[in-house]
């Protein structure tokens, strides 16, 4: 397509409004190109991407190593289904298992599929290993959770917008207050198969649990022979300055649920990662996916894991996260009522006097910065981990100005 062929934003948006189901309310920008931390819209205006597709673009747009891995694989083989072996999946799984310190990987595509897979594995483990009577397995989840959009998953959400109108829902889940280890421990009984939590809640607005919560969850699960399932789909793979957010408390869950950044911003790749005594409960024919573990996904996933294996990006996220925090702190009391920062991930609560989160996101858009509001008054920042400190400075200055607009 030449530049002359590019449609205008208005034309694209009205075509979308006419023909795409209204399950999203996007900001009014039509992105046509991306490179690193920047995108360009159809009119040629550039924006700094501080959302990174909800952490799916941890390595930025079109990272050369990831594009090279995908391009090489596109020239050889893209899809086999798991009816046959392909020559990429084994290497990807071995590398991801090593990065995670676990034995095995069950590859899927989207995050919600990884969560569904984790639920099935936990239930199968409860019946076949722990000895929970068939049909009674219970999974404890947290208030404020976000694990995806399937009917089972929204059934244990406490967000009415996610749930209302989509029941009936699957039984077997109990919601406990996030961050309250004592309540969680008290709720565990003989039928409890697993505790499923986000080590940091992303959609909720980068909500960081009290210090010691993850350790207490780990201890309670170990003591009661219950699986600790960590949904690291948004928090994992470098975002918080460690490979996994659980590492912030030195905790290792029984199952990691991974997604988003695992696909390098190129295609959906998710996985459940665990040891043989847990993941080994799944037998041929019991679970699967036409696309899960496809060679293109495995090639990109392997390149992602190789980038993370050096630890450089994690160290960068930690250092730049401190930088971001230092830049955001002076805004508290000047249009911002609070911030929560973990690595290169920030929830910024906007003073309602300055407008709703959406309005501030629109003002930032006009200033060339892409962010997304969540839950009314919060703006979530998740820049690519490759962003420069000077770009963070510029973006926070735009936020300061947007709050004054
Ligand atoms: C913690 C968490 N789990 C699961 C999901 C669902 O992932 P997907 O949208 O790829 O299904 C998300 C998506 O935002 C998430 O943040």
Image (tube, helix red, strand yellow):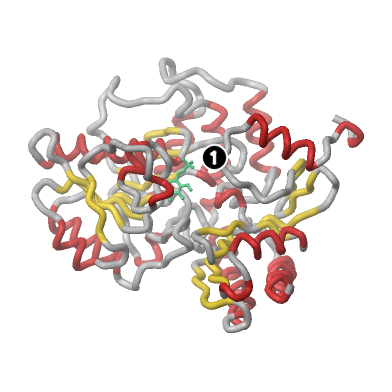
Between residues 339 and 352, which one lies in front from this camera angle? 352
The residue drawn where x is 49% and y is 67% is 342
Furthest residue to the right? 4
In the rendered image of this protein, does residue 18 appear above or below residue 46? above
Left or right of residue 139, residue 359 in this image = right
Q: Is any part of residue 163 visible from this angle?
A: yes
In the rendered image of this protein, does residue 88 appear above or below residue 32? above
Q: Indicate the quadrant where residue 370 lies.
A: bottom right
In the rendered image of this protein, does residue 222 appear above or below residue 261? below
Residue 194, percent from left and from top: 22, 48
The residue drawn where x is 71% and y is 76% is 404
Residue 272, percent from left and from top: 37, 40
| Residue pointed to by mark 1 | 23
Residue 23, percent from left and from top: 54, 40
Residue 99, percent from left and from top: 44, 49
In the rendered image of this protein, does residue 124 appear above or below residue 392? above
Q: Is any part of residue 389 visible from this angle?
A: no
The quarter in which the C terminus is drawn is bottom right
Number of marks in picture: 1
Between residues 30 and 16, which one lies in front from this camera angle? 16
Between residues 148 and 375, which one lies in front from this camera angle? 375
The quarter in which the N terminus is drawn is top right
Q: Indicate the quadrant where residue 387 lies.
A: bottom right
Label 1 environment density (alpha carbons within 10 Å; few <14, some 14–19, many ≥20) = few
The residue drawn where x is 75% and y is 37% is 12
């Amino acid at each position: 397509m030449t530049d002359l062929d590019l449609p205008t934003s208005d034309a694209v948006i009205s075509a979308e409004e006419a023909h795409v189901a209204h399950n999203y309310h996007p900001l009014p920008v039509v992105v046509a190109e991306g490179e690193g931390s920047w995108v360009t819209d159809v009119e040629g205006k550039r924006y700094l991407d501080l959302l990174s597709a909800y952490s799916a673009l941890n390595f930025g747009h079109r990272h050369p190593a990831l594009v090279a891995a995908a391009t090489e694989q596109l020239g050889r083989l893209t899809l086999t289904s798991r009816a046959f072996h392909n020559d990429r999946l084994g290497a990807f799984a071995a590398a991801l298992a090593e990065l995670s310190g676990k034995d095995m990987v069950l590859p899927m595509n989207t995050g919600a599929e990884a969560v569904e897979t984790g639920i099935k594995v936990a239930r199968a483990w409860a019946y076949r290993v722990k000895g929970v009577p068939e049909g009674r397995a219970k999974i404890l989840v947290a208030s404020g959770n976000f694990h995806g959009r399937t009917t089972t998953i929204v059934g244990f959400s406490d967000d009415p917008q996610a749930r209302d109108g989509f029941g009936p829902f699957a039984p077997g889940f109990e919601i406990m207050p996030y961050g309250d280890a004592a309540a969680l421990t008290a709720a565990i009984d003989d039928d409890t198969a697993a505790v499923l939590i986000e080590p940091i809640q992303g959609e909720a607005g980068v909500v960081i649990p009290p210090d010691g919560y993850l350790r207490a969850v780990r201890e309670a699960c170990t003591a009661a022979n219950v699986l600790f399932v960590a949904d690291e789909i948004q928090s994992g793979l470098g975002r918080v300055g460690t490979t996994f957010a659980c590492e912030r408390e030195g905790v290792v869950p029984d199952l990691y649920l991974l997604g988003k950044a695992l696909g390098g911003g190129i295609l959906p790749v998710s996985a459940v990662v665990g040891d043989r005594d847990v993941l080994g409960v799944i037998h041929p024919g019991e679970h699967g996916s036409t696309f899960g573990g496809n060679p293109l996904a495995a090639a990109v996933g392997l390149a992602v894991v190789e980038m993370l294996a050096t630890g450089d990006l994690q160290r960068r996220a930690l250092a730049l996260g401190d930088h971001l925090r230092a830049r955001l702190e002076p805004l508290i009391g000047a249009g911002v009522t609070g911030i929560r920062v973990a690595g290169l991930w920030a929830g910024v609560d906007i003073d309602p006097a300055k407008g709703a989160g959406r309005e501030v996101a629109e003002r930032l858009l006009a200033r060339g910065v892409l962010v997304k509001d969540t839950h009314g008054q919060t703006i979530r920042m998740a820049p690519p981990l490759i962003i420069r400190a000077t770009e963070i400075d510029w973006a926070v200055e735009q936020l300061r100005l947007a709050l004054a607009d």
